[in-house]
Image (tube, rainbow, N blue to C red):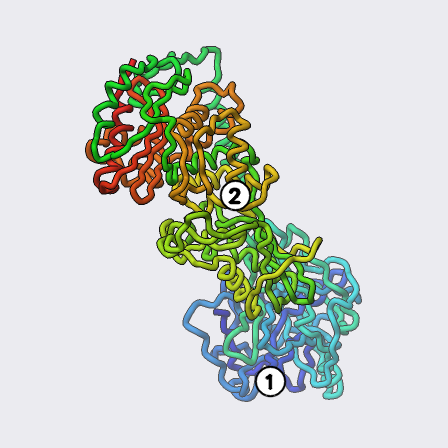
Amino acid sequence: MPDEPQWPTDDDDADLDTPVAESTVQVSRPSVDQPTMRFPVAAVLTPPSTPEPPRSSPVRSDPNGGHGPALPSNGSGGVPGGSSSGKPHGAVGPDGGQPRQAPAEPPRAAPVRIAPGEHGKPAPVVEPKSDQTRVVPKPEVVHRPDQKTTELSVPPGKIENGGPQGGDPRVSMAANAKTARVDQLPKTEPSWFDQPVRPESPRQEPQRTEPQRAEAQRTEMLRVDQLQRYEPPRGEQPQRPEPARSEPPQRQEPLRADQLQRHEPPRADQPHRQEQIRETLPVSGYDEEPEDRLTSDEPKKSRKPLAVVLALLVVAALAGATIYAVKEFGGPAAVETKPPAPPANVQLLVKAATAGAPAPSAAGVKAAITGPAGNAALGTLTGSIIDPAGGTALWQQGDTTPATPASSLKILTAAAALLSLDKTAQLSTKVVQGAEPGTVVIVGGGDPTISGTPGSSVYPGAATLDDLVNQVKQKGPVTKVLFDLSRYTGEALGPQWETADIAGGSVAPIVPFMLDGGRLDPKKDVSARTGSPAQTAADAFAQRIGAPGATAGTAPQGAQVLGEVKSAPIEQLVDNMMQISDNVLTEAVAREVAIKSGNEPSFAGGVKAVRDILTKNGFDLTGANFVDGSGLSATNRIPARLLAEVLATAAKPSLDDPRTAKLRPLLTALPVAGGSGTLAGRYGGNASDGKGWVRAKTGTLTGVNALAGMVVDVDGRVLVFAFMSASNRNPETEVRPGLDAMAAALRGCGCS
């Protein structure tokens, strides 16, 4: 908290017969909103260049430093010669009576007092000999938004010096003071603060008349808020001033405010003088010194040392890392490495199928298969076992006799597709612009796998109806939907197909546009189907596009395509139809084979195309007679040997045969015993030895069961087989387990 000024108790001018005019420099604060500050006259004026004789005035006291003689007292605590009554001249309390009490804490700065002259009277006025003046650096002022403007007045009259030891002069306020900006004043020579002060002889102050005193009281005001703010040079802390010297200041002439010259910032070697001026500035009219008057800014701490320290730490860390790396990885000594450990002796439980394994013999295979093949539950059994490495038939039983293959016929359709179609080809479904505005036409592309509910399809990689709808929506509003089924011809149901199979989930009408294979539950591979899959799919499209409904129609030639979705590649479609034995997808693939080979896309065209392609690739279709591509018709007949020969060509150990390279995906499309597709729940009990080793396609119709595939025996030899049974026994508990046992017997055969 700022120091309290010490108020005199006696009037300094009480003993004067005639009022004495005193030159003053004051901070004018006429009201509570505008307090008054006192500044030493030495902070504003400089002495004349010609030294004067020393004065005999006593030295003012320094309450803080304790140097120099103490001020005389008149016994009342005031300045000698003063009075205890009346308002003192210059600076008293607000009411002119008793002074305010100072706070309890020790003051940091003492008020400026007028050192008395002889006999307790005020010291005589020093008449200056020169007009040279200088404004000392201004005290630091911190302005606050809630503070009023403070002005500094400089009297035009004569100025009293406080005493021989540099005491501060008193200043009185003039009512008609004018304002002058300090920054507009010219520069002057260094002030007498920088020069040694020589004593001068005391002088008697002449008596002044009332007009002279009034003239001396006229001042010009300087606004404190316009003074330049003093900041000590960076890197130097202000120092407390040394005790004042005993030499009195030189004589000065009274100067007007308009003669004051602009203050120059102090030199770097004089911060202690500025601090001394700031610490000796008193305040009158208030109990406390304003904080913005005496508070000094501490020099801002620089962050440069911290940055330097951090940089040094980083450099040291990098240097240490470099030294460590050199010692660890470099140096004259070579790093010795240990030889690698010998490979582990791995005993493979699964042997790779190879032609170098012991060749099985017909006698060995017959000995292994005779028992399972003699199961009475199998009824009429035909079959064939072939060694694909040499193409040798190891076991035959009615292998050339045509029999009902059921779904094992899909092996022939899949083989024809892999031999004739591009494995990466896709089935495309498009929506084109209709003949009328707002009309669109869905052009069926033969893809029965389009998913009506994303994430709920049994067809991996299927396109979605929502994708097609969103593409069309972006082209504009749709008011009418047509669907074009002209890609296929002929009947939608195959020969001897029963309509009951639609509700039973085995099949749906074969059309080029449908959703989820016509299933009512798209999540189940065996689910009831719809009898009108194209209409159902077109209505779902119209409902999502915002049209009232869909009707059959024909797309204009060369119409603009508004949207298109594509199926999974042909190779994946073949795999999918074999795994879940999907009849609808198989018939769609057969029609694509027909279109590719130039046949009509119908049941008859598909059958013809399959036969033509297999015959072209060297397969003997003698005795084969089928009317569809899926094997759903009970009138289909093929010999077991045809199935075995197609599988043996796909399973050859060498890819020298171009047919083998094309048919190889047929083997991976076969369900795994006890693991996937239609064999996932089979191969338990007596057939458990074949679990995981047998891959085969199943076939089931009423009274008919078939199994055709491949197996790897214990010697690592691949064998292919085809078994077809005609039996009235229970297929679930007797016939199918009997066929599984025959294939498992081949797995345990060391038939060399």
- Residue appearing at x 66%, y 54% in the figure: 561
In which quarter of the view is residue 710 placed?
Answer: top left
Characterize the local packing of mark 1: few (<14), some (14-19) or many (20 or more) Cα atoms within 10 angstroms: few
In which quarter of the view is residue 689 placed?
Answer: top left
**Is 29 above or below relative to 498?**
below
Q: Give 256 or 401, whichever is nearer the viewer.
A: 401
Answer whether residue 309 is visible to the viewer in this image.
no
Left/right placement of residue 374 relative to residue 675 reads left
SS type, badge 2: helix
- Identify which amino acid the numbered label 1 is placed on: Ser
Q: Give 613 or 8, whichever is nearer the viewer.
A: 613
- Identify which amino acid the numbered label 2 is placed on: Ala
Left/right placement of residue 393 relative to residue 293 reads left
Q: The C terminus is located in which quarter?
A: top left
**Is 719 above or below relative to 603?**
above
**Dot 2 corresponds to which residue?**
604
Q: Position of residue 254 (x, y in %)?
A: 75, 72
Calculate the distance from the C-alpha at mark 1 to the C-alpha at mark 2. Answer: 118 Å
**Dot 1 corresponds to which residue?**
31
